[in-house]
Amino acid sequence: MFRTTAALITLFCVSAVPARATDALSEPPPLFAKLLVPPSLVAPTPVLLPASRGAALPALYAGLAALELYDGFTTTTGVHRGAVEANPLVGGAAANGPALWAIKGGATAGVIYLSERLWRQHHRGQAIGVMLASNGIMAVVAAHNTRVVPSR
């Protein structure tokens, strides 16, 4: 009995005819075909990714973050060395480190959020313009801080 079963299994495996894939189905799939196919064998639906930002926008984000960090560092250093904060909106927070860093982080996140919204609404030139203007303003502020902060 065992030899007969083994011979039949071997015969079925060896004599299997290879199937060929066709471009079109000869008949429509059965109504319950999805129920018969295990979920692990169903091909996933492709995900559409948003348009690529290229290298410009992420570089501008990183530049803004670096300039904000430098501005926060020079402001904190300058206030501890006797300088006075010229910005009236930040004046009271300049002596308080956590408050200053919260303002700097919020400003950076707000500008990046605005730029991202513009990008996603297909105002790509405006998004890059906002980031260029923000980076330019922060570069001027950082250069001013470098001149004003007394070095010891």
Image: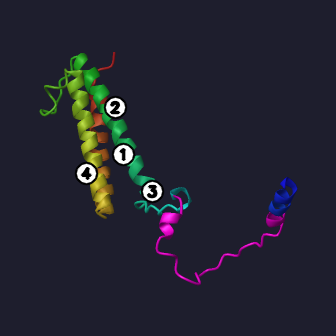
Q: CA distance from mark 1 to mark 3?
A: 12 Å
Where residue 15 appears, as percent x and y from the top left, is 82, 70
Q: Is residue 94 left or right of residue 28?
A: left
Q: Say whether disc 3 or disc 2 marks the residue closer to the N-terminus.
A: 3
Image quarter in which the C terminus is found = top left
Residue closer to the observer: 50 or 126? 50
Q: What secondary structure prevails in the magenta region?
A: loop
Please tell me whether mark 3 or mark 2 is closer to you in this view: 3
- The answer to whether residue 71 is above or below residue 35 is above
- The answer to whether residue 54 is above or below residue 31 is above
- The answer to whether residue 53 is above or below residue 16 is above
Q: CA distance from mark 3 to mark 4?
A: 18 Å
Please tell me whether mark 2 or mark 4 is closer to you in this view: 4
Where residue 59 appears, as percent x and y from the top left, is 42, 47
Residue with the mark numbered 1: 61
What's drawn in magenta, residue-wise?
Answer: 11-38
Q: CA distance from mark 2 to mark 1?
A: 14 Å
Residue with the mark numbered 4: 114
Residue with the mark numbered 3: 54
Q: Say whether disc 1 or disc 3 marks the residue closer to the N-terminus.
A: 3
Residue closer to the observer: 7 or 107? 7
